[in-house]
Image (cartoon, rainbow, N blue to C red):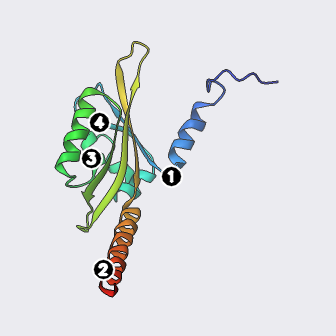
């Protein structure tokens, strides 16, 4: 009988890599120790969030994971989290190549060495544009119905 130790020591590294590559969320890793904190790993789902090939962000600054023209307030919050190497989550609004806007849920989390120093940051992203658009449509529909009801009453 296998005794559960609470660790994943029995999981081969290539399985973890395969899982990260197949995940439905965009997963990227940046090297926190190198200048510019470049992207050293990006899975295929990053493409659906950013609208560009995952290979295009490899070696580039962490900023390439934010899309084009991210909102200033969100950008400042992400910059602070990166600078401090701390966990952070935000809904990020940015532009696509076709100039439409996209929304992504972004979580940044530090990876630490045994000494507790941040060595890398992991970036988890998913496109929530359609969810945001559905919510806006729902609010609009509710507002219209409330206005009709008020005028009826």
The residue at 35%/18% (across/down) is 117
Disc 1 designates what residue?
24
Query: What is the spatial separation of the Cα atoms under label 3 and label 2, in whole angstroms?
Result: 44 Å
Mark 1 and mark 3 residues within 8 Å of each other at the beta carbon = no
The residue at 37%/74% (across/down) is 142
Judging depth in this view, the residue of 50 and 52 nearest the camera is 50
Q: Is residue 63 above or below residue 147?
A: above
Which one is closest to the eye, mark 3 or mark 2? 2
Disc 3 designates what residue?
64
Q: Earlier in the sequence, mark 4 or mark 2?
A: 4
Measuring from the top left, give residue 146's x and y in whole percent.
34, 77
Disc 4 designates what residue?
38
Q: Residue furthest top?
A: 115
Mark 1 element type: loop
Query: What is the spatial separation of the Cα atoms under label 4 and label 3, in whole angstroms?
Result: 9 Å
Mark 4 and mark 3 residues within 8 Å of each other at the beta carbon = no
Q: Residue furthest right?
A: 1
Disc 2 designates what residue?
147
Judging depth in this view, the residue of 66 and 71 nearest the camera is 71
Mark 3 crowdedness (10 Å alpha carbons): few <14, some 14-19, many ≥20: some
Measuring from the top left, give residue 81's x and y in whole percent.
27, 33
Task: Tell me the quadrant of the picture where the N terminus can be found.
Answer: top right
Mark 4 and mark 1 residues within 8 Å of each other at the beta carbon = no
Q: Earlier in the sequence, mark 4 or mark 1?
A: 1
Which one is closest to the eye, mark 4 or mark 1? 1
Q: Earlier in the sequence, mark 1 or mark 2?
A: 1
Residue 66 - label: none
Query: What is the spatial separation of the Cα atoms under label 4 and label 1, in whole angstroms?
Result: 22 Å
């Amino acid at each position: 009988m296998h005794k559960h130790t609470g660790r994943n020591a029995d999981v081969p590294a290539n399985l973890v890599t395969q899982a990260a590559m197949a995940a439905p969320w965009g997963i990227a890793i940046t090297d926190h120790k190198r200048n510019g904190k470049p992207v050293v790993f990006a899975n295929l789902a990053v493409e659906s969030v950013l609208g560009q090939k995952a290979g295009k962000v490899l070696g580039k600054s962490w900023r390439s994971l934010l899309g084009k023209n991210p909102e200033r307030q969100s950008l400042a919050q992400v910059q602070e989290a990166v600078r401090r190497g701390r966990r952070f989550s935000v809904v990020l609004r940015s532009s696509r190549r076709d100039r439409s806007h996209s929304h992504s849920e972004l979580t940044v989390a530090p990876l630490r060495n045994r000494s507790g120093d941040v060595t890398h940051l992991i970036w988890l992203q998913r496109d929530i544009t359609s969810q945001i658009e559905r919510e806006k449509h729902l609010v609009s529909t509710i507002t219209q119905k409330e206005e009709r009801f008020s005028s009826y009453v």
